[in-house]
Image (tube, rainbow, N blue to C red):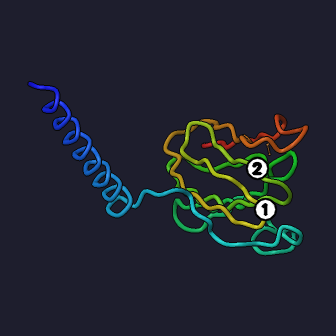
Amino acid sequence: MRVHQYEKAFLWLGAIMLVAFMIALLVTSVAMGIHLPGRAGEVDPLSINSIEPFNNPGVREVGPGRYEVVLLGSAWSWNPSEIRVPAGSEVTFLAASTDVIHGLHIDRTRVNMMLIPGQISRNTYRFERPGEHLLICHEYCGAGHHLMSGKVIVE
Ligand code: CUA
């Protein structure tokens, strides 16, 4: 092979990879419905404690095997800081910040989202196995950032 033939081959390789990645993106986003946790709405952070459903944080059963967790992040704690759900349940987290930006991550799950003041973040996850998951803040939010933890207990 001469040098310009290698160049041609690499150009083709690049073009094929581009098409393959576009197809992978389309299949995962359109056919499989996988996307980033989106903004689920807006809420006034100054009066969040009196706005439904954030005036009543906690775990609620919304159907057979389905739960909703209303979760508030504040410097420097989670409310509630302990979440209990039965194994096999599908849990939708509806989370918001009452002050600054926090990051919500539940260990060993794909629940990972930013809590931006004024926005509601939503994410759904199925907890298959019993056990404990650490609930942490992964965005530096001040002197007590490292204290901001909780747990999800799957029973
Ligand atoms: Cu909240 Cu770091």
Say if disc 2 is inside 8 Å of ligand 1: yes
Name which residue lies at 16% across and 27% down: 3
Q: The N terminus is located in which quarter?
A: top left
Quarter of the view holding residue 121: bottom right
In this rendering, position of residue 45 left or right of residue 86: right
* Quarter-of-image position of residue 8: top left
- Structural distance between the alpha carbons of marks 1 and 2: 9 Å
Q: Residue at x 30, y 57 (%)?
A: 27
Question: Which is more toward the observer, 16 or 69?
Answer: 16
Residue at (20% x, 34% y) in the render? 7
First in sequence, mark 1 or 2: give its number. 2
- Identify the residue at image location x=88%, y=42%: 142
Front in this rendered view, residue 68 or 11: 11
Tag 2's secondary structure?
Answer: strand
Does 57 sit above or below residue 102?
below
Q: Helix or strand or loop: what does disc 1 sit on?
A: loop
Residue 28 position (above or below residue 148): below
User: Going by the image, does 105 lie left or right of 8?
Assistant: right
- Counting from the top left corner in percent of width and height, residue 117 is at 78, 62
In front of the other: 11 or 147: 11
Residue 98 lies, in percent from the top left, at 84, 60
Q: Position of residue 153 (x, y in %)?
A: 66, 42
Label 2: few (<14), some (14–19) or many (≥20) C-alpha neighbours in 10 Å: many
- Residue at the disc numbered 1: 117
Neighbor class of circle 1 (other Cα within 10 Å; few <14, some 14-19, many 20+) is many
- Amino acid type assigned to the residue bearing label 1 in the image: Pro
Q: Quadrant of the C terminus?
A: top right
Q: Residue furthest left?
A: 1
Kind of residue sitting beneath label 2 = His
> Ligand 1 is located in which of the four quadrants?
top right
Q: Which mark is residue 102?
A: 2
